[in-house]
Image (cartoon, rainbow, N blue to C red):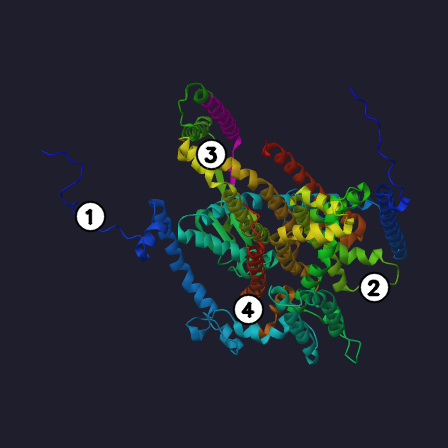
Amino acid sequence: MSLSYVREEMVPPQPAPVRTTGVIAWARQNLFATPFDAVMTVIGVAFLIWAIPPIYNFIFPTFLGGDAVPPGGTVEDCRAAGAGACWAYISARMSFFIYGFYPPAEYWRPNLVFLLGALLIVPLLWPRAPFKRINALLFFVVYPIICYYLLNGGVFGLRRVPTEQWGGLLVTLIISLVGIICSMPIGILLALGRQSKLPIIKTLCVMFIELWRAVPLITILFMASIMLPLFMPQGTTVDKLLRALVGVTLFSSAYLAEVIRGGLQALPRGQYEAASSLGLSYWKSMGLIILPQALKHVIPGIVNSFIALFKDTSLVSIVGIFDLLNTVQAASSDINWSSPTQAVTGYLFAAFVFWIFCFAMSRYSIWMERRLDTGHKR
Amino acid sequence: MAVQSNTRSAPPRVAFYNDPVIRGIIYQIIVAGLVIAFFVWIIANTAQNLAAQNKTTGFDFLFQTSGFGISFTLIPFDRASYYWEAFLVGLLNTLLVAAIGIVFATVIGFILGIARLSSNWLIARFATVYIEVIRNVPLLLQLFFWYFAVLKAMPAVRDSLALPLGVFINQRGLYVPRPIPDEQFGWVYVAIALAIAATIGVTIWARRRLEATGERFPVVAVNIAILIVVMVLGFIVSGASVAFEMPELQRFNFRGGLELPPEFVALAFGLTIYTAAFIAENVRSGIQAVNKGQTEAAQSLGLREGDRLRLVIIPQAMRVIIPPLTSQYLNLTKNSSLGAAIGYPELVNVFMGTTLNQTGKAIEVIAITMAVYLTLSLATSAFMNWYNARVALVER
C-alpha cells in the first residue's frame, strides 16, 4: 500500500468550452445576457423592421429601390401618389439655398470665398501642416477682410451687392465664422476680467456675462435689431446683417468666457506663482503660461460653444435674415414645386447640412482632445 | 526672547506709475470712465432719437387696453384687457410649456442616458443614434419640422386621426378628454393627502427600525399599496365620480374636451425631444464619473444590488448630474422663446412681438422681458450654488 497524492488515472475528457468568440457568443453576451435584455432586443429588432423600410423608401431615390424623386425629376413625379422625398426640388433650388438672392452672374465671388476658406482652414486644422502662425494670421485676419470686399463689392470694379441679397448657406457660414472669430478674444478678455483682482473690472465683467447668459438669444437679436438703431447717433444706419452679427457675437462671447474661466480655475496656483517668480508681466504671464494651458484644458467646451453658435445662427431667420433655414422655409411655399413632400424634403436637407457641420466639429474636438492629452490625468 | 530688530531695508523707490496698487486704480478709473462715457453717449443718442420720433417713455402703457386677442390663454383675456394682462398671459404660457417640457425631458433623458450605457448593444446603439442626431440639428429647424411638416400635414378636421382613449389629432391641434370631477371629489384629494402622510410616516418608521434592529421592511411595495388602497377607498366611500367630457366631432370642428393648439403641441414636443438628448448626455457622464472602485467597495461591504445603487452610486452620480441638469432646465425655459417663430403665444411672442409693435415702447418692453429671464436665471443659479455647497465633497 503506497500513499500517493498523485493521480494515476487520466482525467476524463471535458466537453469543449462554450464558445467565447464569434457571432453567437457575441449575441449572447451583448443582446441576450438577461431575460430583460432579450425582451428589449426583440422589441428593438421589431422596431427596426417596422421603421426602416418606410424611412428607406422615403429617402432613397427610385434607382436605389426607394420612392424618392432623384435630382432631375419633374414636379409631376413628386406630386404622384406614394412619392417619397422630392430631391428634384432641392437640386432645382440649390443655388437659392447656397447663395440666397446673390446675383447669379456674381456666383464666382461666394465660390471663391468658399474655396479660399477651405484652402486656409484645412491646413489650420491639420496639426502637422507647417506655417501655423502665418496660416492662422491669414485665416483670422486677412481672410475676413478679403471676404468682406469680395462679397460686398464696390472696389476694384466689382459690382456692389448689398447684404440684403446675401443668403442661404453663405450667410449661415458668415455669421458663424464672424461669431467664432470675434467672440474668442472678447471671451478671453471677459474670462480674465472675471478672475481679476480689480473690483470694478471684475464687477463689470460679471454683470456683462451674467446678463447675456441669462436671456435667450432671440431677445438679444430683437434687441439688436430694434435698439441698436436707437443707440446710434441720428442719421447712422446699421446694416441688418451687422446687427445680427453684433448680437450673436456678444451672446457667444459670454458663453465662451464661462468656458474659459473653467480652464483658468482648473490650473494649479503654482503656475501663476511660477509665472510671477519669473518676473513676467501680467499680459506676458497670461499669454505665455496661463492661457496656453487653460485653453488646452477647455478645447471640448470651446468647440461645444462653437457648435451651439453654429446651430443658433438659425435664429437670425426670426429677425428676417435669409440664412439657410430661412431660405428653406421660404422655398417651401414655392408653388412651382408644391407637392405633399416639399416641406419635409426641405427640412431634411437643412437638417442634414447642419448635422454634417456640427457632427464634424464634435468629432474633430474629440480627436484633438485625445491628441493634446499630455497624460496629466491619472 | 530675542527681539529681532527690523533690519529690512526700505523698499526700493519706484515710480508711482509702476506701483501695482496705483496702477490697478488707474486702470479701473480708465475702464469705469470709458464705460460711463459709453452709456452716456448711448443714452444721449437714444433720447435724441426718441425726441426726433416724437416718442415718450414710461411704463403707463401697461394700463392701456390691448385691443388684440390671444389664441391660447390660461387666464381670461380679450381685446379689452390691459397690456400687463397680456404680459401675464405670455409669462404663464412660457412657464406652462417649460414645466411640461422639463417633466417629460427629464424622464426621457434619464431613460436615454441609462440606455446609452446599457450592456445591450442594440439599445445602446439606439440611444447613441438618437442623441447624436438630435443634438446636432438646430432646435428651430426641429420646431419647424414638427409644426409645419408634421402637425400641419395632419388630416383636416373632417377626417381626424382617432387615437386610443378618445384622443383626436388634426390640423387644428390635439383634442383630449377633459376630466370633470364632481363635488364629492374633494374627499379624494383629502384621501390622497392622508395617504402621502402615511407613506412618509412608514418610511421614517422603517428607517428607525432598520437603524435600531437591522431588520428590513419592504418600504416601496408597502407605500405603493397604501397609496392605491387609500385612493380607491376614498373614491368609493365618498361616492365621487369623474365624468370625462369626450371631444366630439361637430359639423366643422370638435366640441368639448380639452383642445391643445398645434403650436403648443409642437413646441412642447420639440423642446422635450431636444432637451432630452442633452439631459441624457449629462446623466451618462454623471454615471461614468462614479469610480468603478465605488461599486467594488459597495460589493465588498455586502450591499445588495438595489442598496448599492441607492446608497452609493446614485448619490455620487447625482452630485455630478444636478448642476448641468438645472442649467438644461434653464436652457429649456429660454428656448421656449422660439415658440414665437411658430406662433405659440409665449412671452417673447405676445410681449416683445405684438405689444412692442402696437405700443412702440421698445426700451421698456425689452427691459421687462429681459428682466423676467434674468430673474429666472438668477434664481436657478442661486439654487445651483446652494446645492453645490450642500453636496460638495468635504476633502481632507
Which quadrant of the figure contains the C terminus of chain A? Answer: top right
Q: Dot 1, crowdedness within 10 Å: few (<14), some or many (≥20)?
A: few
Numbered disc 4: what chain?
A
Tell me the kind of residue under disc 4.
Answer: Gln
Tell me the kind of residue under disc 2.
Answer: Thr
Tell me the kind of residue under disc 3.
Answer: Arg
Q: Rounded to the nearest whole Å, what is the CA distance between mark 3 and mark 1?
A: 43 Å
Q: Who is closer to the viewer here, A182 or A338? A: A182
Say what secondary structure mark 3 lies in: helix
Which residue is tagged 4? A342
Say what secondary structure mark 1 lies in: loop
Q: Rounded to the nearest whole Å, what is the CA distance between mark 4 and mark 1?
A: 66 Å
Viewer-nearest of discs 4 and 2:
2
Q: Are marks 3 and 1 in contact (CB under 8 Å)?
A: no
Numbered disc 1: what chain?
A
Asked if one can make out residue B256 in the rendered structure from this viewpoint, the answer is no
Q: Dot 3, crowdedness within 10 Å: few (<14), some or many (≥20)?
A: few
